[in-house]
Image (cartoon, grey):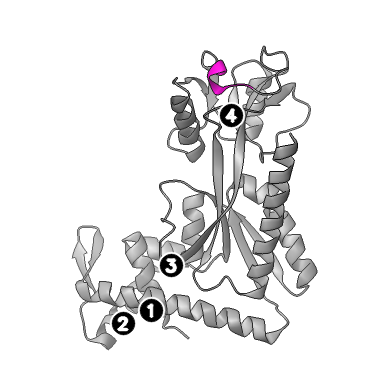
Amino acid sequence: MIDARLHVLRMLAEHGTVTEVARHLNYTPSAVSHQLQTLARDLEVTLLVQDGRRVRLTPAARTLLEHTDELFAQWETIRAEVARSAGESGGSLRMCGFSTAAAALLPFVARTVVEAFPRVVPRIIEADPEDCFDLLLADRADLAVVVATQSLPPSTDPRFDQQPLLDDPLDLLVPENHRLAGRSSVLLRQAADEPWLLDRPGRPHHQLVLAACAAAGFTPTAAHEAAEWDTGAALVAAGFGVALVPRLARLPAGYPIVRVPLRGDPQPARHIVTAVRRGSRRDPVLTTALAALETLAVQRELDARDR
């Protein structure tokens, strides 16, 4: 077993304050401080120095962390191999993902895993992509499905194993009686003069839409802000603007709205990736879950070609 205090130090390197580490690990701040102090005492080195409200890692702490990442990856590999050799898996499978993944992908994965391993209890956590990596690092989730953004850890981050899953195209959402509603496909710039419904500034979808519109040669006029697809669908149906919606997003039934595929360049899409802790991918339950996601991704690609 790996010394739990190394996990606390690792979390401190990620979050910078004892309070944040305590929040992510469900510890008290005093418990976090005690573990770090005893680790430093046992190693007979200084690991932390105060830097305002935060703490700064010493060179000794950073050297320790360089080895810790590899140690944790090896431990995950050992756990996966032990689970594989045991033959019958139990326990839990904790999956996290952004709202669309939690609705459109993860329930199928959970059902597939339970069919293969009846003793496994699945748990699905809806979370923003950045929070998904925090959950993985804190060992509160085993598998994350996220939209790739610049704010996430790079694919080379030694703590995680990230793999591309699928591209989720964006469609133009318009009212049923809109001038573009009857088209089989449209260029994004054909909606340049429309009022637009956008996500809140700073959110990944907001940035994606702005980047796509900029590539098409215009800046969208933001008429309204909507964070939920239900709200966006209602506003589009009422004629208050158009929006870009991912094809995976499930919109409420009954609204007089139409999805129109985009053609030409750009054809914006969300790039969806899977992430697990490095070394854990060979765990039989995780292997089954990832295979289920790959099956869904292939089916989505086939459906997209048939459109």
Residue at position x 53%, y 79% in the image: 77
Q: Which of marks 1 and 2 is nearer the N terminus?
A: 1
Which residue matches tag 1?
A: 5
Residue plotted at (41% across, 67% down): 158
Q: Where is residue 190 in the image (x, y as percent from the top left)?
A: 56, 16
Cα–Cα span, label 1 and label 4? 46 Å
Q: Distance between the residues labelled 1 and 2?
A: 6 Å
What's the CA distance linking mark 4 and mark 2? 51 Å
Q: Mark 3 points at which residue?
A: 159
Q: Residue 244 carries which label?
A: 4
Are the two marked residues, 1 and 4, in contact with CB atoms closer than 8 angstroms?
no
Query: Going 66% across and 23% down the picture, which residue do you hit?
Result: 185
Q: Which amino acid does label 1 sit on?
A: Arg
| C-alpha distance separating marks 1 and 3 | 17 Å
Looking at the magenta stretch, what is its main secondary structure? Answer: helix
Neighbour class for label 1 at 10 Å: few (<14), some, many (≥20)? some
Quadrant of the rendered image containing residue 187: top right
Query: SS for tag 4?
Result: strand
Instruction: Say if the magenta span includes residue 109.
Output: no
N-terminal of the two: label 3 or label 2? 2
Q: Quadrant of residue 125?
A: bottom right
Q: In this view, does 95 lie above or below 60?
A: above
Q: Which of the two labelled residues, at mark 4 and mark 2, occupies the earlier sequence position?
A: 2
Q: What residue type is labelled 4?
A: Leu
Name the foreground residue: 175 vs 92: 175
- Tag 1–tag 2 contact (CB < 8 Å): yes
Judge the density around disc 2: few (<14), some (14-19), many (≥20) Cα neighbours within 10 Å.
Answer: many
Residue plotted at (75% across, 37% down): 306
**Magenta segment boundaries in residue numbering:** 186-191
Image location (x, y in percent) of residue 13: 33, 65
Closest to the camera, between mark 3 and mark 2, is 3
Q: Distance between the residues labelled 4 and 3?
A: 34 Å
